[in-house]
Amino acid sequence: MIDLLYGLPGQTLDIWRQDLETAAALGPDGIDLYGLNLIPGTPLATAIAAGKFPAAPGLAEIGAFYDTGADFFRRRNWRQISNNHWARTTRERNLYNLLIKEGADCLAFGAGGGGSIGRASYGIASDLTHYAESVRAGRKPIGLLAMADGLQPLRNLVTAGFEAGRLDMAALEAIAGEGTTAFLAPLVAQWEAAGLLAFSDGIVDLTVAGRFWYANLISAFHDILETRLLSAVDAA
């Protein structure tokens, strides 16, 4: 498995194609593509601000890199198993990323790790001193704990569906209630017109552009559905 970053300072599409060729030539079972998340205060962001590196392309500009990568793997018959993951062989299944978004339990180990059990999500203390002292004292080094509300199964369905590039509206309606598909129809039609998805027989299929913007689509679905369901509860 190889992870590749796109949207790096000074990276051109030609350089990106060379990166893809080099990685694929190594014959890995799978390759993951991730856009650079330039976090303020990190060494790279600081170096760019100081003029030591050219500016990194913005989010609207790096879509071409994702499109180039998707086309690269499509031409080679690699199987796309999620928005950022492509498999060359059956050994690469991306189970962690897919299952965790479906709401599967995940046990976390080590400082800074995060996991979930049922409705509870938790994080292991990231401070190494605190972590080590807790372990030596026989205490669980839990740094944070949160409990999900009753809408979590709905969020999991939307997140897991869009992560895999396909959302079954009938399954969504079974959780969110009758009329959900009709309620979301204007939004789905707008996104379809924008080239983000195709909608047929109750199935939303993300296009390459939709897969690139999938996090935004998930966020919009969550906000709209939660507002509708919470309003219905308040009205009752």
Image (tube, helix red, strand yellow):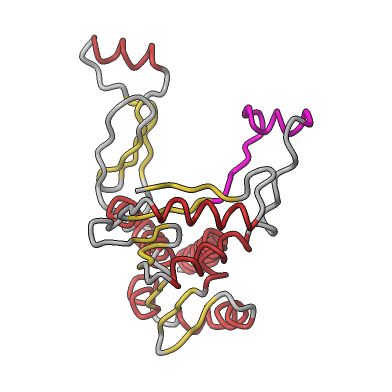
Quadrant of the image occupied by residue 37: top right
- Report the front residue among 17 and 146: 17
Side of 75 where 44 appears, left or right: right
Q: Residue at x 61, y 52 (%)?
A: 15
Magenta-drawn stretch contains 46: yes
Identify the residue shown where x is 30% and y is 55%.
29
What residue is drawn where x is 31% and y is 39%?
Answer: 115
Q: Nearer the viewer, residue 38 or 113?
A: 38
Task: Give coordinates of residue 79: x percent, y percent.
Answer: 35, 68
Which region of the structure is painted magenta?
35-51
Residue sitting at x 34%, y 48% = 1
In the rendered view, would you say 28 is above or below 135?
below
- Image coordinates of residue 113 in percent, x first then y, are 35, 32
Can you tell which quarter of the image residue 110 is in? Answer: top left
The percent coordinates of residue 81 (x first, y second) are 35, 64
View extreme (right): residue: 51
| Snapshot quadrant of residue 112 | top left
Q: Closest to the observer: 41 or 7?
A: 7
Q: Is residue 122 above or below residue 11?
A: above
In the image, residue 133 lies in the stretch drawn in magenta:
no
Where is the C terminus found, in terms of image quarters? bottom left
Judge left or right: residue 145 versus residue 197: left
Residue positioned most to the bottom: 201
Q: Is residue 188 above or below residue 95?
A: below
The spot of residue 101 in percent (x, y) is 35, 55
Please say whether residue 235 is visible from this viewpoint: no
Q: Residue furthest left?
A: 138
Residue 139 can be seen, yes or no: yes
